[in-house]
Image (cartoon, helix red, strand yellow):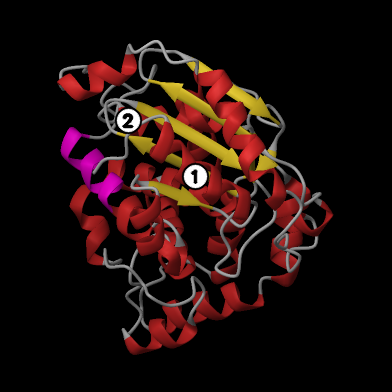
Amino acid sequence: MGYGHPFTRQFLYCRMNYQETLQAILNDIEPARGKGRVAAYIPELAKVPADKFGMCLLFINGEQYGLGDWQEKFSIQSISKVFSLTLAVSKYGDKVWERVGVEPSGTRFNSLVQLEFEKGIPRNPFINAGAIVVCDMLLDGFENPKLEVLSMVRDFAGTDAIHFNLAVAESERKVGYRNFALAYFLKSFGNLHHEVETVLDLYFHICAIEMTCEELANAFLFYTNHGSAPGREHFITNSQTRRLNALMQTCGFYDEAGDFSFKVGLPGKSGVGGGIAAIHPEAYSVAVWGPGLNKKGNSLMGLKALEMLTSRIVPSIF
């Protein structure tokens, strides 16, 4: 763990009452509670109350602060794409980028038009097509990729109490028509090696990982700490970690990545389950959960909370 940067040391060890300040943020965003829409196109997610909210702030020195529903499990959905990509990079290194790009999409996360225009090479690994290709790579590289991903996430989070929600995975499979279309497009362009059903089974299970804000903040400390976690020391290189963080900064929020960078200024990843995980390298990780989504598919309360966090309490990367 490096605390070398003087600015990092300064805010890590200042004696602000973080718990009080987090509560002040929650009080300020309270009018947004229950607003936005849950991801009702996935039947199991439609059952989640829109008024839930949790937040966990975790410093690299181990200091942790949480409030609200921060210890309640939720479906992390597309946040899991960071984990599956990390496993692929650990196995294949730069070969990953031969099959998926690194540019922001600027279009919907499940766009068919963009994939066809770019001849089967997904714009980045965080849109659905890119994550599906990453799952295909994991099927090439591991005998049991579901277990490999789950084991890695558990190591990062420091707990075995993380599982797939099988009801959510099945719910996604039943209504995953567009993901099937994307996968068949990828197959037609030769960028999918395995059968569509097999690849999407892995994809749906990874998206259905359930975690709490506390577990998610702990897991994302890996990206704060140069790609090291207990049991996974130097799992990926420092350079690879920086590249993944750069991808989160530019591509982590669907077609709202620019707005998130402008207002919050942290590398991170959102999911339609209402979760957001973000990091400041060598400093802290933060996870929020608010199931009510804005029109771009990102948590309404979560975005407001993180904007206030980097405006009032801790610095952004800028």
- Circle nearer the N terminus (2, 1): 1
Image position, residue 191 (x, y; %): 36, 73
Give the left or right position of residue 78, taking residue 2 as reference.
right
Which percent across, then down, holds residue 142? 42, 44
Q: Residue 117: percent from the left, percent from the top?
A: 34, 89
Give the residue type that dot 1 points to: Pro
Residue depth check, mark 2 versus mark 1: number of the one nearer the observer: 2
The residue that appears at 38% across and 49% down in the rendered structure is 85
Q: Which residue is mark 2?
A: 224
Q: Main secondary structure of the magenta part?
A: helix
Q: Quadrant of the N terminus?
A: top left
Report the front residue among 37 and 130.
37
Asked if the stretch drawn in magenta spans residue 239, the answer is yes
Placement of 15 over or under 23, stated as above or below: above
Q: Nearer the viewer, residue 73 or 292?
A: 292
- Name the quarter where the C terminus is drawn: top left
Q: What x and y, as percent, mark residue 263?
A: 39, 53
As drawn, 103 above or below 261: below
Does any portion of residue 1 appear in the rendered image?
A: no
Q: Kindly check if marks 2 and 1 are in contact, taking CB atoms under 8 A apart as contact.
A: no
- Give the quarter of the image for residue 131: bottom left
The reply to whether residue 62 is visible in this rendering is yes
Mark 2 closeness class: few <14, some 14–19, many ≥20 residues within 10 Å: many
Identify the disc placed on residue 145: 1
For badge 2, the amino acid type reads: Thr
Badge 1 local density, few (<14 within 10 Å), some, or many (20+)?
many
Q: Up-down: is 152 above or below 95?
A: above
User: Per the image, is 122 magenta?
Assistant: no
Question: Which secondary structure lies at badge 1?
Answer: helix
Q: Quadrant of residue 226?
A: top left
Q: Which residues are magenta?
A: 237-246
